[in-house]
Every structure is written in C-alpha cells, then in structure tokens.
Image (cartoon, rainbow, N blue to C red):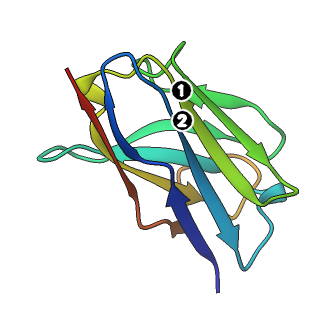
Amino acid sequence: QVQLVESGGGSVQTGGSLRLSCVASGMSIRYYCMGWFRQASGKEREEVSTMVAYGNTKYTDSAKGRFTISRDNTKNTLYLQMNNLNPDDTAIYYCALQTGAYCSGNWAYWGQGTQVTVSS
C-alpha cells in the first residue's frame, strides 16, 4: 500500500521560511513524477511545483524564485523549501505522486496535507 506523509508545516511570519517533507512508503519514488499542491480556504487546489523522475522541475509563477522542490531517493522523500513566505502562501500543502516518470497530470497518490500559515 502506497502512503505519502507530509510534515514540516507550521505558522511563520511574512518573510519566513519552511521546509516541507513528504515521505513515501510502499514504493520507491525514484522512477516517478512527484509534485506539491496547495489549497487555500475557499479556493481550488493548485499545483505549486513538480519534478519529473530525472530531475527537471516546474513551478507556478508565484513560487518561482522563492520555492525549491527536491528529492532524496535514498530517503524516499520529496521536499519543498519555501522562502520569503507571504500570507498568500497560507494553505494546506499536499504532495502527490504519478506512476510515470514524466508529469502527465494523472496523480495516483496523495498525502493527507500539512497546514502552512503565514501571518503579516
């Protein structure tokens, strides 16, 4: 059974940083596309960043220059380093995995989410 478990969320002030982690179990993430999504209260879920199996990354415009996605295949863990946070980043953050090397949009597995709250 595949499970994704996020951690690292919390409350920070504007300009602060957080590093989210997503530990996978039940399969190796080495060969698969993974991504981070977020959903703010009253809004639709949006894609924040994705990483194909071989390392290429993609970011939403609001994350570019502030967020960095990375993975440690030896730890079966996906990360999202978030710097210079602002209140618009407040949301529940989810990690997800596709059962393919490239990110095609078919997300097969999701974590339970971790709350990020940024105060002004």
Give the quadrant of residue 91: top left
Q: Quadrant of the C terminus?
A: top left
**Label 2 residue SS:** strand
Residue occupying image coordinates x 60% and y 56%: 22
Would you name the residue on which mark 1 appears? 59
**Label 1 residue SS:** strand
N-terminal of the two: label 1 or label 2?
2
Residue occupying image coordinates x 76% and y 74%: 27
Residue, far left: 42
Residue occupying image coordinates x 81% and y 58%: 75
Q: Is residue 4 above or below residue 47?
A: below
Say left or right for 43 vs 64: left
Q: In this view, does 22 lie above or below 48?
A: below
Residue occupying image coordinates x 58% and y 68%: 4
Q: How crowded is mark 2: few (under 14 residues within 10 Å), some or many (20 or more)?
A: many
Say left or right for 91 vs 97: left
Could you say which disc has been placed on residue 49 in the image? 2
Say left or right for 48 vs 79: left
Mark 1 is on which residue type? Answer: Tyr
Residue 43, x across and y down, in percent: 17, 43
Mark 1 and mark 2 residues within 8 Å of each other at the beta carbon: yes
Give the quadrant of residue 46: top left
Could you say which disc has been placed on residue 44 in the image? none
Say left or right for 94 vs 79: left
Q: How crowded is mark 1: few (under 14 residues within 10 Å), some or many (20 or more)?
A: some
Give the quadrant of residue 116: top left
State the CA–CA distance, disc 1 to disc 2: 4 Å
Is residue 85 in view?
yes
